[in-house]
């Protein structure tokens, strides 16, 4: 059984100053580590776009096209307590002068985890894919357009689309989420969405080009509006060669 029940997503634009570095340093070194004192906080990760990533996007409409940064906190039981404490902790840190000015937000809210898939070549179970080192993600955000057709599309995603995504070279797994009234809070962004996170072990922009035709086919007659489909690079180092044998 997957211990993760909810993914809390924060999608942001660039800073009005054009320099995101002070905010990113604060979030990585100060704000994100503090979240691990929450009862159900399991993992926090951040990813960012690059010029190559932006060129490899398959979809980006309206404000979603301006998304440059993605954060996801994976939360488990007790879900409600963890979500409420997440916002309480933010307020406490702000009172201590430890809450940086936020980047312009496109979306902020919790989504229920629907299912997890892993590529057979990954040699790990689907439930641990996000904990495996990766180079980045490919994020897909969809908005339902025909409520009566959503059950059929959900079945198609489960049996066809998600298995096809994890069969693409460079994709080691995919986790699918949906908004739900069961965990909604007043501070969440409005709207109903499905989000899919593909975890990548090849260059994100390169994998993005491989995924584009898969998504174009999937969206041909799908009852959804693609809002964002884009690769993002991991903020963590991927540099094992530095620890190889001496030259």
Image (cartoon, helix red, strand yellow):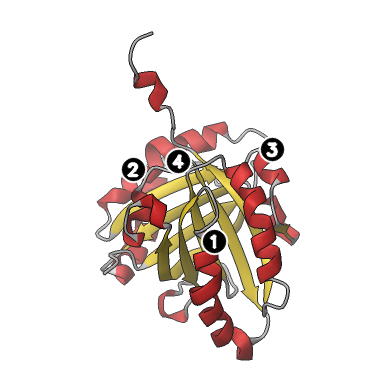
Q: Distance between the residues labelled 4 and 2?
A: 8 Å
Q: Distance between the residues labelled 3 and 1?
A: 23 Å
Marks 4 & 1, CB-CB < 8 Å contact: no
Q: Nearer the viewer, mark 3 or mark 2?
A: 3
Helix, strand or loop status at disc 4: helix
Image-based side of 145 in relation to 110, left or right: right
Give the image quarter of residue 79: bottom left
Dot 3 or dot 2, earlier in sequence: 2
Q: Distance between the residues labelled 3 and 2?
A: 28 Å
User: In the image, residue 163 lies at what x, y percent?
Assistant: 49, 66
Dot 3 or dot 1, earlier in sequence: 3
Identified at 56% across, 67% down, the residue is 189
Q: Nearer the viewer, mark 2 or mark 1?
A: 1
Q: Nearer the viewer, mark 3 or mark 1?
A: 1
Give the image quarter of residue 140: bottom right
According to the picture, the residue beneath numbered tag 3 turns out to be: 51
User: In the image, residue 43 lies at what x, y percent?
Assistant: 34, 52
On-image quarter of the C terminus: top left
Dot 4 or dot 1, earlier in sequence: 4
Could you say which disc has been placed on residue 20 in the image?
none
According to the picture, the residue beneath numbered tag 2 turns out to be: 33
Could you say which disc has been placed on residue 27 in the image?
4
Q: Can residue 51 be seen in this view?
A: yes
According to the picture, the residue beneath numbered tag 1 turns out to be: 165
Examine the rendered structure and indicate whether residue 110 appears above or below residue 158: above
| Outermost residue to the bottom | 148
| Outermost residue to the top | 247
């Amino acid at each position: 059984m997957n211990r993760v029940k909810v993914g809390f997503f924060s999608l942001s634009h660039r800073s009005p100053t054009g320099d995101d570095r002070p905010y990113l340093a604060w979030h990585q070194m100060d704000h994100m580590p503090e979240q691990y004192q929450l009862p159900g906080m399991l993992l926090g990760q951040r990813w960012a776009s690059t010029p190559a990533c932006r060129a490899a996007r398959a979809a980006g409409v309206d404000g979603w096209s301006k998304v440059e940064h993605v954060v996801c906190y994976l939360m488990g039981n007790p879900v409600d307590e963890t979500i409420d404490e997440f916002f309480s902790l933010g307020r406490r840190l702000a009172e201590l002068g430890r809450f940086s000015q936020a980047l312009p937000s496109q979306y902020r809210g919790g989504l229920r985890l629907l299912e997890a898939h892993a590529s057979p070549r990954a040699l790990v179970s689907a439930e641990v894919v996000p904990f495996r080192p990766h180079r980045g993600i490919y994020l897909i955000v969809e908005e339902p357009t025909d409520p009566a057709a959503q059950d059929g599309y959900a079945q198609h995603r489960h049996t066809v689309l998600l298995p096809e995504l994890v069969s693409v070279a460079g994709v080691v797994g995919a986790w699918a989420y949906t908004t739900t009234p069961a965990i909604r809070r007043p501070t969440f962004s409005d709207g109903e969405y499905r989000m899919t996170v593909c975890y990548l072990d090849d260059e994100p922009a390169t994998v993005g080009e491989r995924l584009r035709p898969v998504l174009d086919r999937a969206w041909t007659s799908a009852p959804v509006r693609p809002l964002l489909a884009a690769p993002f690079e991991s903020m963590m180092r991927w540099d094992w060669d530095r620890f190889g044998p001496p030259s």
